[in-house]
Image (spheres, rainbow, N blue to C red):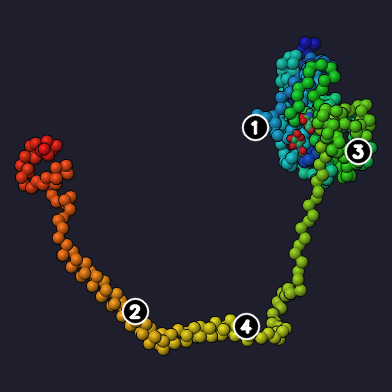
Amino acid sequence: MLRRDVFNIRGVILWLSLSRGLCDQIVYPIVGTLFVHELDTEYFQQQFPSVKNNYDVDSTDPIVYRANLEGFPDLPRWLRYTQRSPSHKAYFYGSPTDPGKQVIEVTATNRQTFETVQRKVIFIIRPSTVMQIPFQAEFLIRNLDVEELLPAEAQLDFQTPLQDVWESQKMTVLNITSALDKGGRVPLPLPGHKEGVYIKVGSDAPFSKCLQESQDVQTRKSCETGVLPAISCHEEFARQFHIDWCNVSLITYVEPTPVQPPLDGSGIMDDGSEFNPPSESLEETYYLTDYLLTLLLPLLIALLLCAILSYIMCCRREGIEKRDAETSVIQLVHQQSVFANTEELRHMADNRNVPRPLSTLPMFNVRTGERISPRQTSEDSARVPLILSQH
Ligand SMILES: *[C@@H]1O[C@H](CO)[C@@H](O)[C@H](O)[C@H]1NC(C)=O
Ligand SMILES: *[C@@H]1O[C@H](CO)[C@@H](O)[C@H](O)[C@H]1NC(C)=O
């Protein structure tokens, strides 16, 4: 009888766990603002079948998680997941960039029993109600790991001195990033060696003098030489947070001035009204001089040129003819003299009784001065070499 009761109770629990399943969790991040979601270790702990059936609620087995965007192997770009070790808390954190709905599947594995349970976390990302925060500062805290700054209390601890330094009460944490994600180096696994974490804070108030000191030429110089810069508000944080003043970045977003709509001039007509052209021109202008200058003057010059040309062509023709006649007479005289000279030369050549130069005669032997009739040797020269035939 007792055994049957126990069996029944077990059966009921099993049925309950099957029918209930794991309910989805809904979270509401806001675009552009830091969002941190701590995974509910206790909840997952309770869901492992062995824990349920053993009523062993108090035991906390180490759990590891794996998370991915539903239907994809990895998380969305903006969302990061971190858990230092299976016995530590696990966090989702990041700063969403676009509104919308994203379903994240979280699979928890019990490291003792290797049971797994799965749960969906639904992210309903809402658009930001405020415009861009105009003044944003990013600090690198060297003595913390990212998980240590994710709990809200830790962020408050940091904001309290910052509010004094910044002289502003209203602050929003915009982003938290592990220094490892920004190219930092993995620290030695020794106590006191932390990876470092970047925290970005925004406010409406302009940066105070102290914050601006971090951007000074002097600070930059000592950073370059490796000397710790002297910042006046360093002490405010020094107890808890080791801020790297060389890695502070201050960003100012200037709101774009709204574009002025074009101003209407006086000449715009009302709807339905008619256009009345002005009855009298404002000023009478005479274009006569312009007309004369642009049209008549060139015309006159053209006419003048025409007249001069006609005069030269018609009336001065005589002169040209006369000159022509003069030149032809000169040419005639010249031609006659050439002719006479040629005649004279020919005559002189006829009278010359000198033999023709030897070199112009055929087959003249240079050495002997002998003349050979070309016909005489023509038959031999076909057979005898040219040099022998010359003897
Ligand atoms: C938050 O920081 C991460 C890592 O540096 C960066 O990729 C991301 O763009 C930042 N998000 C916003 C909204 O600034
Ligand atoms: C800090 O900033 C300097 C330059 O300003 C850079 O070289 C260095 O890598 C930064 N350190 C870290 C941990 O990001």
Mark 2: which amino acid? Answer: Thr
Say if 80 sits above or below 327 in the image.
above
Mark number displayed over residue 290: 4
The mark that comes first in sequence, 1 or 2, is 1
Cα–Cα gap, marks 2 and 4:
52 Å
Q: Amino acid at mark 4?
A: Asp
In the figure, 115 relative to 368: above or below?
Answer: above
Q: Residues within 10 Å of mark 1 (few under 14, many from 20)?
A: few
**Residue picked out by circle 1:** 71
Earlier sequence position, callout 3 versus callout 1:
1
Could you tell which of marks 1 and 4 lies nearer the N-terminus?
1
Mark 4 closeness class: few <14, some 14–19, many ≥20 residues within 10 Å:
few
Callout 3: CB less than 8 Å from ligand 2: no
* Closer to the eye: label 3 or 2: 2
Rendered location of residue 249, percent (x, y): 81, 37
For marks 3 and 4, give the one nearer the viewer: 4
Closer to viewer: mark 3 or mark 1: 3
Q: Quadrant of ligand 2?
A: top right
Please, what secondary structure does the residue beneath circle 2 have? helix
**Sooner in the amino-acid sequence: mark 2 or mark 4:** 4
Q: Label 3 amino acid?
A: Cys
Q: CA distance from mark 3 to mark 1?
A: 48 Å
At horizontal 28% and vertical 77% (from top left) the residue drawn is: 332
